[in-house]
Amino acid sequence: MNWKIDSVDYDFKNDKFIANVISDSGISFLVEEDYYRQMMDNYASSVWRDELKTAVAQKVKQVTGSDAEVIINVSHMGRDALTYHDEVPRYSKVSQKLSSEASIYIKGNFSATHYLQEMLEIKQWIVEKKYDASLTFKSEKEKIYFAIPAEDLKNIKSVEDLNPYRLQIN
């Protein structure tokens, strides 16, 4: 593997070293010691974040016609819930196990009149792709804000079903 150590930092609070590593495919991830001085990394969650960010950004651009800020969080550190050997599985294969630890945040230029339809189309695509995660939509002008828990994604079938997830912005 042609992976490169980008930086090494020391965490004084937890008395450990943390290395930022970049894989040959450009994935940036952390390697650190756990409480028992065993090495662990977040390579798998970094691969999933990259996979989801790329796919979701392309879909949002296709639906809205403009680029969006997409932030993905998959906080799993590659322990316990999953076992992989040679290759990290696609997120859709493990998403049900990780949905409570994952979120998709989309800040985009949604239509002033058709934003609910755009959000519904993106939400349906996320469900079809099995990208189980909580989903947040926010407009560029910050007047539209929806937050949908992962467990509710499959229950939303129409634009009216989105209304309970609208949040007020003060």
Image (cartoon, grey):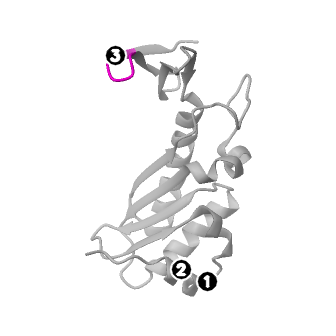
Residue at figure coordinates x 58%, y 68% from the top left = 123
Residue at figure coordinates x 57%, y 48% from the top left = 101
Q: Which mark is residue 162?
A: 2
Q: Is residue 106 left or right of residue 59?
A: left
Q: Which quarter of the rendered picture does the N terminus lie within? A: top right
Q: Secondary structure at mark 2?
A: helix
Residue topped by disc 1: 158
Residue 11 belongs to the span the image colors magenta: yes
Residue 121 image point, x, y percent? 57, 72
Residue 120 image point, x, y percent? 56, 75
Q: Secondary structure at mark 1?
A: loop
Residue 57 belongs to the span the image colors magenta: no
Mark toward the viewer: 1 or 3: 3
Q: Is residue 102 left or right of residue 157?
A: left
Label pair 2/1, CB-CB below 8 angstroms:
yes
Question: Mark 2 packing: few (<14 Cα in 10 Å), some, or many (20+)?
Answer: many
Residue at figure coordinates x 60%, y 32% from the top left = 44
Q: Which quarter of the rendered picture does the C terminus lie within? A: bottom left
Q: Is residue 167 left or right of residue 23?
A: left
Residue 79 vs residue 22, the one in the foreground: 79
Residue topped by disc 3: 10
Question: Mark 1 packing: few (<14 Cα in 10 Å), some, or many (20+)?
Answer: few
Label pair 3/2, CB-CB below 8 angstroms:
no
Residue 33 image point, x, y percent? 50, 18
The magenta segment is: 6-15
Mark 3 to mark 2 CA distance (whole Å): 45 Å
Mark 2 to mark 1 CA distance (whole Å): 7 Å
Compare marks 3 and 2 and give the one earlier in the sequence: 3
